[in-house]
Amino acid sequence: MTDRYGWPVYSVQPCLIRVRETYMKVRRTTPYFYVLPGLLLVFMIVYVPVFSNLIYSFFRLSSYSKEMSFVGLKNYVALFTDPVLLIIIKNNILYVVISLVVQVGFGTFLAILLESGLSGKANGVYRNVLFTPALMSLTAVGLLWQFIYTPKIGLLNSLLRFLGLESLQHVWLGESGLAMLSIIGMSQWQFTGYITILMVVAIQKIPEEYFEASRMAGANAFQRAIYITLPSVKEQLLVCSIITMIGAFKVFTEVYVTTGGGPGNSTHVLGTYLYQQAFLYDDLGMAAAVGMILLIVTLTISLIQLKMARTGEV
Amino acid sequence: MNVNTRTLKLKRLTSNRLKRNLQSLLLNLFMIMLMMIILLPFYWLVVNSFKTNHELFLNSLNIPETFQFQNYVDAWVQGLSSYYKNSLIVSVISMIFIIFFSSLTAYGISRFRFKGKNLIFLLILGGMMLSEQIALVPLFKMLTSMRIYNTYLALILPYVAFRIPFSTFLIRAYMLSIPSDMEDAAYIDGYNSWQVFRYIIIPLSKPILASCALVNLNFVWNEFVFALVFIEDSALMTIPIGLMAFKGQLRINYVVMLAGIIIATIPLIVVFSFLQKQFLRGLTSGAVKG
C-alpha cells in the first residue's frame, strides 16, 4: 500500500515488530521461557486438582489411605437423595438473592448518592468508612458478629434492651429460622461498601458532559440516575453482580466460623457441606461430588458473563 | 431586562439553592446514620476489648472504667504473636512469588508473538473461574503425597498458583499500555529480552506491581479455606485460623478474644490507609472478591 506520494505506508505495529525482529536477540523459543513457569504452576495446582475432583467424585476414598474403589454414580445418588441438600440449595440461593439486592442494589444506590455531589466535603470519609469492613478478615468479622449476636451480652440484644424493644431479642445464631439470615446480614455489613466503591469508580469514569447535557435538558437527579448513570455503568454492574453471585455460592468461612452449619443443619451451604463430608466424615468422594455442583454453578455464571460481555448485551 | 423578570429569576435561583441545600442536608443525615450503623460494631469491639470480663457481662454498651491494656498484651503473648509470624512469612513469600511469576507470564504474553499464545493466555485466565474449594480435596491428597502437608509450603504453593491468573490478567493489561519505543531502542543498543524485562518493563510497571502486591497481600493474609485444611500444627497456623484456635483456647475469656480480633485487623487497615490509591486501583481494575 502506498500513500498519495507513492511512499509505502506501514501501520505502527508491524514497523515496530520489524525493528525488534531485526535487532533483538530473541529466539523463537524465548517467549515460552517467560510464560511456562506460570502456566505450569496454574496447570499443576489448579487444573489438575479440579480435573481429579471430577474423577474422585466417582470413587470412594478417604484421607489417609491410597485405596480408591470405583462406585459409579453412587456419590451423586447419595448427594441428591440427602434431604440436607435442599436446605443447602435454599440457603445458597437466599445468600445470592439478598446479596444481589443489598450489595449490588443498595450498594449502587449509595454510589449514586455519593457521586451526586450533594454530600459535600464528607464524601471521602463516607467512602472510607463504607469500605473498612471489607478489609477485615472473614474470621475476624465472623468472630466479632458471633459476639454481636450473643444472647445476653451481645451488641444487638443489648441495644434492643436499651431501646426498650425486649420483645425483639433473639438467640440470633441459635434459632434455625434466624441463623442463616443473621449470617447473611453480617455479610451485607461487610461487603456492601466494597461494591459501592467499585461502582463509584465506574461512575467517576462517565464523561461530565453527559450529566451537563441532561441538566440542560431539565432532567432531575432521579432521571439522571436512571437514564445516564445506570446505562453508562452497566458493564461494571454486571461484573459486580457476577462476583457477588459467585461469592455467595462459594461462601464458606462466614458460616464455618459462626455456626458451622448448625443449629441442626439449618445453615449449611455447599462449602460447609463439602468440608464436613471431606474432613469430618472422611468421605472424599462425596465431597468431590459436592465440589462438582459448585464447579458447574460457578462455571455457568462465569460463562454467562463472558457471553454477555462478548455479545455486547451490556 | 426589566425589574420584574429579574426578581422572578432571583426568586427561582434562591428557591433552587434552598432545595439543593435541603437535599444536601437530608443526604448527609442519611449518610451519617449509615456510618453509625457501620461503625457501631467497631465501636463496640474497641470499647469492650478494654474492659474486664466482669464489666463486659454487666453491660456491654458502657464505657470501661479503666482501660485494660493488659488484654492486648495477653492476646499477643498467648498465641497471636506466633500466628503473626506465620502469616508474615507465608504472605511475604507468596507475594514475592506471585508477582515474580505473574509479571514474567504477563511480559511473555504482552510483548511477544508466538505459537499457542492465545491458548496459553486463555488457559491462565480460565484459572480465575475455578474456585479454591473445588480443588480442595485433590490438593489435600496431592500435598500429603508430596509430603509437604502441614508445612509453610503447603500454603505458599496453592496461594501462588491460585493467584497467578488474576495477577497476570492485571499486569498484562498494564504492560499492553506501555509504548514500545524504549524497548526497541534498548534492543538496538544490544539488550536481550531479559534485560529489557528487568531494566525497562519492570521499572515502568511499578504502579501496577504495587497494586497487585497489595491485593494479593489482602487475599493471602485473610485466606481461610486452604489455611484450615492444609495446616494441622498450631505452631504453623496463620492468623485467620489462629484466631479460631485462640477462641477455643480462651473459652469465655471474651475480652482477650476481642483484643485479638483488633490486633489481627489492624495491619491491613494501616496498610490500606497509607497505600489507599494503589490498593483501590488493584481492587477496582480486577474486581474479584475475596
Image: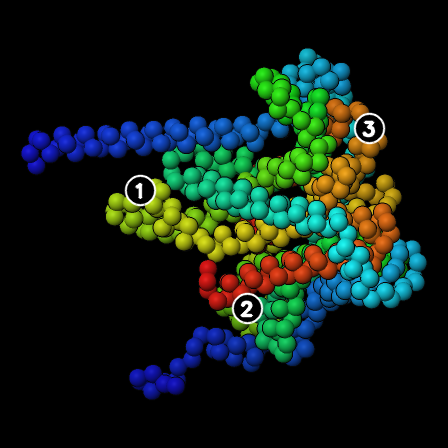
Task: Determine the CA span between mark 1 and mark 3.
Answer: 57 Å
Disc 1 and disc 2 in contact, CB within 8 angstroms: no
Q: How crowded is mark 2: few (under 14 residues within 10 Å), some or many (20 or more)?
A: many
Residue B250: give its label.
3
Residue B23: x percent and y percent? 35, 32
**Residue A168 occupies which quadrant of the picture?**
top right
Residue named by callout 1? A220
**Residue A61 occupies which quadrant of the picture?**
bottom right
Which residue corresponds to the image point at 39% horizontal and 81% vertical from the top-left?
A: A9
Residue named by callout 2? B183
Q: Is mark 2 on a helix, strand or loop?
A: helix
Question: Label 1 is placed on what type of residue?
Answer: Asn
Question: Label 2 is placed on what type of residue?
Answer: Glu
Question: Label 3 is placed on what type of residue?
Answer: Leu
Seen as rendered, the residue at the extreme top is B65
Give the side of residue A16 with respect to residue B137, left or right. left
Task: Determine the CA span between mark 1 and mark 2.
Answer: 51 Å
**Residue B125 occupies which quadrant of the picture?**
bottom right
Disc 2 and disc 3 in contact, CB within 8 angstroms: no
Question: Which of the two residues, B279 or B137, is positioned nearer the viewer here?
Answer: B137
Of marks 2 and 3, the one in the foreground: 3
Which residue corresponds to the image point at 41% horizontal and 53% vertical from the top-left?
A: A232
Q: Residues within 10 Å of mark 1 (few under 14, many from 20)?
A: few
**A158 lies above or below B279:** above
Q: How crowded is mark 3: few (under 14 residues within 10 Å), some or many (20 or more)?
A: some
| Subunit under mark 3 | B
| Subunit under mark 2 | B
**A18 lies above or below B4:** below
Question: Which of the two residues, A57 or A214, is positioned nearer the viewer here?
Answer: A57
Q: Which callout, 2 or 3, points at the residue further toward the start of the chain?
A: 2
Of marks 1 and 3, the one in the foreground: 1
